[in-house]
Amino acid sequence: MKREAHRAVYVISVAAELAGVHPQTLRIYERKGLLSPARTDGGSRRYSDADIDMLRKVNQLTTGGLNLAGVKRVLELEAELAHTKALIAELQESQRNALEQARREHRRDLVPVSQAVTVYRRPRKP
């Protein structure tokens, strides 16, 4: 059975091991605003599969040479891009629906034209 990606199930030590970082690193990422794990009633952090994926991405970016401020900006831009793509898709769908509606409305206004050709000639003078 597949677990939901945003269901927070991992304690900090397991999340750190899955992401390949030290548990203290997760705390730093949280302080810097890169990650926001769920909390239990007692205040313990719980991480989801989506959090683990985010940790791996952050780790990949920092390994690639970005500092945490740069990583945060990249993540913000990626979120903005995803939002913009979703908006574009929504607008395209709306435009397609409007175009199809206009075609249906104009189709009713069309009158069939006979395809027969009639040639009219002037009568010859005697």
Image (tube, rainbow, N blue to C red):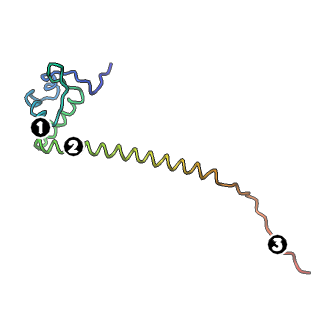
Label 3 and label 2: CA atoms lie apart by 76 Å
Any mark on residue 32, and which? 1
| Secondary structure beneath label 3 | loop
Farthest residue to the bottom: give it: 126
Which residue is identified by label 2?
76
Q: How far across and how far down the image is residue 15, in percent?
A: 16, 25
Q: Quadrant of residue 73?
A: top left
State the SS at label 1: loop
| Residue that appears at 30% across and 24% down | 4
Left or right, 108 with respect to 19, comes to: right
Front one among 88 and 116: 88
For label 3, the residue is 121
Q: Earlier in the sequence, mark 1 or mark 3?
A: 1
Q: Which residue type carries mark 3?
A: Arg
In the picture as drawn, the residue positioned furthest to the left comes out as 24
57 over 16 or under it: above or below: below
Query: Residue 76: percent from the left, percent from the top?
Result: 21, 43
Q: Give whichever of discs 3 and 2 has the lower sequence position.
A: 2
Q: Is residue 89 left or right of residue 107?
A: left
88 in relation to 60, above or below? below
Which quadrant, please, contains the C terminus?
bottom right
Residue 3's quadrant in the figure? top left
Circle 1 packing at 10 Å, graded few (<14), some (14-19), many (20+), is few
Q: Residue at x 28, y 27 (%)?
A: 5
| Circles 3 and 2 in contact, beta carbons < 8 Å | no
Residue 55: percent from left, percent from top: 17, 33
- Kind of residue indicated by mark 1: Lys
Q: Could you tell me residue 54's position as x and y percent?
A: 20, 34
Element type where label 2 sits in the image: helix
Q: Answer with mark 2 or mark 1, whichever residue precedes in sequence.
A: 1
Residue at point 49% right, 46% down?
97
